Amino acid sequence: MKRLYIIAGEASGDFLGAGIIDKLKGVNIKGIGGKLMESKGFKSLFDINDISVGGLIEVIPHILKIKRLINKTVDDILTNKADAILTIDSPGFCFRVAKKVRKRDPKIKLMHLVAPSVWAWRPGRAKSVAKLYDQLLTLFDFEPQYFVKYGLKTTFVGHPVVEKFAGANGEKEDILLLMPGSRTQEIKTLLPIFLKSLENIEAKRIAIPTLPNLEPLVKAIIGAGNIEIVSDEDEKLKLYKSAKLAIVASGTATLQLALSECPMVVCYKLSWVSYWIVRSLIKVRFISLVNIILGEAVVPELIQKDCSPEKISIAASKLNVDVQLKNFKKLRTKLIAEGKIPSEEIATAISQCLNEN
């Protein structure tokens, strides 16, 4: 039986990893993942929240711990005699693991899912990724061109988010979603701002979709009140499809909402040092995946000083819902190859890689 080692370092990667486990049969799978992967019978080497740290300056206090976990992961890969490794997103952690594995056992095949955003910033990473990996699987159709020129086998597989989130439930309900991200620091920074914005936004029902392990943190921030905390995946999906509005942190969740036809205001805030560094390097007009993929300002983006309770409530009141929904319907065709099912494309690519050994 072939042995595959998967590394998913954050919530979006956990979603992708769970779908892969569902599709791959007759393969011994070990590695690192979250609650969705564990629900498939997978046992993670450690809690992915230990490495799910955003920002540039924000990661500094965690560096020594992350280095220890990198070494622990490499040792586990070699102990389990993996035939291939699939790293999913989280380049800061995954690429360092891959480099160490490559040095210690060059025979192990290295695959990566979710291309680093070289089209947005640090384009030089494309060449280094090409030197390190045997194959790259991309979620967006415009990404392969940045890597194939360096000789890396690169395949557009489409985004599995389409398979779960496409389409609304019909009539929208008076539900407001607050979605401050899947990292501890994001929640600590954004949720208080989102809560303050509620002073000028009305809704019969307010809910915060989150991960089970983050519920205690969310509860501590919101305190007493009538705001629901929802961590069940099926319930979250129902909310996405029936809510009238979401205030959401920039990330994969914006695609999930757009495909579910939920209007949104996108927000984000970093430390000023991290933001200054990123801003000096970034090459795209937008930060939300929805706007980047569609190529226009479909959803409002409130970043740094604009990410304030007052500006969030103003953006929510001025939202052009019809324009958003019209554009959201275009997304599906941009996230999937015609006639293909993304999760099956990913599973096929992995199986082929395993059988090359």
Image: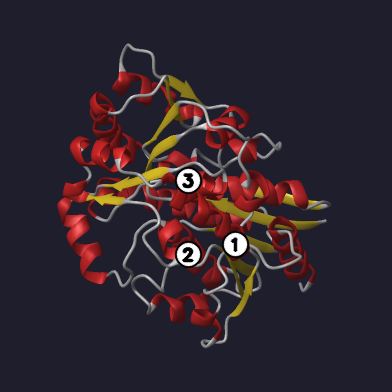
Q: Foreground mark, 3 or 2?
A: 2
Q: Are marks 3 and 2 in contact (CB under 8 Å)?
A: no
Q: Are marks 2 and 1 in contact (CB under 8 Å)?
A: yes
Residue placed under numbered mark 3 in the picture: 253
**Residue type highlighted by circle 3:** Ala
So how many labels did they put on this image?
3
Q: How is the image coloured?
A: secondary structure
Residue placed under numbered mark 1 in the picture: 335
**Residue type highlighted by circle 1:** Leu
Q: In the image shown, does 146 or 296 lie closer to the viewer?
A: 296
Query: Counting residues from the N terminus, which is met first, the one under dot 3 or under dot 2?
Result: 3
Q: Give the numbered dot on residue 293.
A: 2
Cα distance, mark 2 to mark 1?
A: 9 Å
Residue 124, given in percent of the width and then of the height, sits at 37, 79
Residue at 24%, 40% in the rendered image: 314
Element class at badge 3 = helix
Q: Quadrant of the N terminus?
A: bottom right
Residue at 49%, 80% in the rendered image: 146
In the image, residue 334 above or below residue 232: below
Residue at 49%, 38% in the rendered image: 47
Element class at badge 2 = helix
In the image, residue 14 above or below residue 287: above
In the image, residue 216 above or below residue 98: above
